[in-house]
Structure formats: C-alpha cells, structure tokens
Amino acid sequence: MSVSVTLTVNGRSVTRSVEPRTLLVQMLREHLGLTGTHVGCDTSQCGACVVHLDGRSVKACTVFAVQADGASVTTIEGLAAADGTLHPMQAAFREHHALQCGFCTPGMVMSAIDLVKTNPAPTERDVRVGLEGNLCRCTGYHNIVKAVLAGAEAMRPPVVPAAE
Amino acid sequence: MYAFNYHKPGSVVEAVALLGQNEDAKLVAGGQTLIPTLKQRLAMPGDVIDLSGISDLSGIREDGDGLVIGAMTRHADVVGSDIVRRRIPALAALAEHIGDRQVRNLGTLGGSIANNDPAADYPAGLLGLGATVTTDRRTLAADDFFIGLFETILEPTEVVVSVHFPVPERAAYAKFPNPASRYAVVGVFVAKTSTGVRVAVTGAGAGVFRETAMEQALSAQFAPDALAGITIDSAALNDDIHASRDYRAHLVTVMAKRAVAAAS
C-alpha cells in the first residue's frame, strides 16, 4: 500500500507517493533530498531531526509522513532568506561558534526558534530547559546557550521609544 | 518496522467501525509511543488508524465544576492553556514535564492514558484528581479505568473521547524523572478535593495506584509531616536498572511530601 502525501515544505508544495510507514524525516531526506535534517538516535531522544510542523517543533523521526499530509513543514534549509542572508538564530550560532562537529546544529537551531517564539526573552535557565530534547554529543552546550540567548535578542522586534 | 495499512477516519463512529473490521489494528494519536514501538518491531498491526482527522476530539473547555479535555489534545496545549493554568495549575505543571518540548507538541492525553505506561504522568493526574473518562460508549471513573501494566478497562474497539477533571481545592504533582526518558522513576499526584484527599503514585509499581495510608494521614492533617510515620511496602514495587524497589519506596514518600508542600 502506498499513499499520496502533499506537504508544503519551506513554502513549496510537494506531493510524493510513500508507504504509510515512511517517516517524515525519511520523506524529507530520501524523497525530497533535504538532507539538512539529520537522523541521530532515531529514538526521539537526540533532536537532530527537529523540524517545524505547522509552526511547532517536532522530531521528524517520530512522525509518519502521512500524518503530516496537508501540513506546512519548515526545515533548516527554509530558514535563510532567498538572497542567502542567514536567519538571526543561524547567524547567532555562527557568531558564537555554537557548534563543534555540527551534527546536532540543524535540530538545535529549529528547536531554539520554536522556544523563542513562545518565550521571546528567555533566561539562560529557560534555554537550557527548553533545549532538553536536543543532545550535543560534543557537549558543546555552553556556546549553544550563548547563541540562543543572542539569537533571541536579535529576533525580538526593536523597542520603539514612546513619542515625546 | 513492518508495513501496515493506513486509515484516517473523520469521525469517532468511523474509527470504531474500522477497529471492528481490522482485528489487529492500532490507533495512533500523537504517535510518540506507537512509532518507537513499531520501529522496534514490538508490535505488528496490520492497520493503523490515525485519529488526527477527528477535529472534535481536541480542545479544552470549562464544564461546571471542572474541565473537559479532548483525547487528542496535545500536551503542549494543556501546558499553554489559560483555562487549565487558572483552574487546575497542577495539571498544567504535570503536562509541562512530560518528555521534552517536541514530544509535548505531538503527544496526546488520550494516547497517554490508553497506553497506560506504568511510568507515564497523566495516569497519576487522572487518578489523583478523580477524573472521569468518556469513551464512544460510556463513562469510566479513573479508579476503574487503569487496570495494570499497559492495561486499561477499554474494550478492543473502544475509543477515548475526552476526560473530565473536577477542580480540586488544591493539588500538586512531584516527579523524580529518569534523566534520559523523562518518564517518572516515581511520580506522586496529591489532591485535596471536596470528597477527600487522593494520592496517586506512578512509576513505582506495575501501574498507577492510590496510596490509601497517605490519603488517611493527609485527611487528618494536610502537611508534609503527616507522612513521616508511613512506610511504603516495597515488595510489589518495580525493581530495574533505574532504581531498586527499596529506593522507589523511599522516593514515594519523598515525592509525596514535596507534592503536599507544593499544594499547601
């Protein structure tokens, strides 16, 4: 049995015929060639596969592609602007050298953006707790936390001073 | 994982019919337990029935003296609900510590209680608050719903629709999480309700259970010290690589005291 799945991936509508057991991360990587989303543990613990499903961070290794039928998916490839300008969170990760081997980075960035969406001014503790679903095997958490704090600040709309 | 056929019914009636037609079918709600189970080939359903197309299974509303939460309501929606935070903050706090943020964005109330993992959090919340489960065919008290290890009173074709939580006078949940899985090594939900004190324990035994000696002690005096003289019998508790049964027995008292302190 195969089923037709239509997704809006990074703003583009795509339709593929997949088996029901195909995971969302498999569809992204193997059917659509979007290999920026990584498979780490494949047991919904490490967070390397985090993408946004209708605006919420999820572990794409623990969603069937068919469950996402009709949904909007954003992957790490969909963050930068068309001209290549990095998303503020990506830029913060680069600025603060928030990666060592880089394997966990796409998932970290996707989780961090979702975190900041519900908590625009997180504390260091909020960031550490909020990223509990993402593991860095290099244990490079210190700079990741610094980058998320800086990225959050960059994502906040500037405070407009009250008119005199 | 083994191959399966996929169904996405648009109504509960249709889901029940599909369960009746396909003997070894499984329901998928958020999939946060089912998908890992299928990956390990611990289950081999010929058919998977996705409940996410049934919109009236989701939502949170006030209902007289309590809250009604739909079976397909995601943990993250319980965490973020103004209604839950205002009426039963202990329930929002419980949901906030299930798994991690990504699991909470998909995992559901109905999925958690129908699976009845012995270390899951929601079963303690339902039993501790004296909740009532509504299915496609009947209503069931939490005291009758949870039977034992991954076992509930649900019939093979029965579908959970919603849960009614009465608002307690005060309540809190204290959990000692496994640092890797965030499941409860031991979790204790304590509630002071209009009909008495209820203490529900998860993670410690084969399934969630009430600790009646603690309930009686807290009925006399709702304070952590009231639990000081109570010894938890460890004989029937879980004993595994995460914790010995004696350690779990100790944790039941520690978590119960913390919950009472937080609820006081």
Image (spheres, coloured by chain):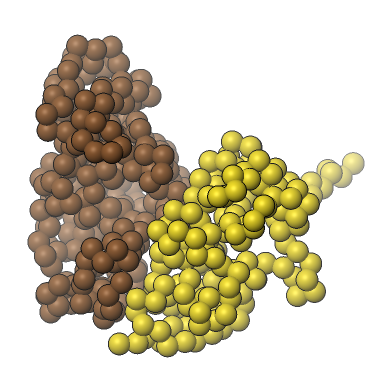
Chain colours: A yellow, B brown
Residue B139 x/y as whole percent: 13, 53
How many marks on residues?
0
> Is B72 displayed left or right of A69 in the figure?
left
| Above or below B100: residue A77 | below
| Above or below B42: residue B202 | above
Closer-to-camera residue (B250/A163): B250
Residue A64 x/y as whole percent: 39, 72
Evaluate whether residue B36 shows in this view. yes
Closer-to-camera residue (A138/B63): A138
What is the residue that sits farthest to the right in this orientation?
Answer: A164
Q: Residue at x 41, y 67 (%)?
A: A63
Residue A144 x/y as whole percent: 66, 47
Name the image quarter holding residue A79: bottom right
Q: Residue at x 40, y 64 (%)?
A: A62
- Quarter of the picture containing the C terminus of chain B is top left
Q: Residue at x 49, y 50 (%)?
A: A133
Q: Residue at x 19, y 63 (%)?
A: B159
Evaluate whether residue B72 shows in this view. no
Residue B19 x/y as whole percent: 16, 73
- Quarter of the picture containing the N terminus of chain B is bottom left
| Above or below A45: residue A146 | above
Closer-to-camera residue (B35/B146): B35
Closer-to-camera residue (B170/B51): B51
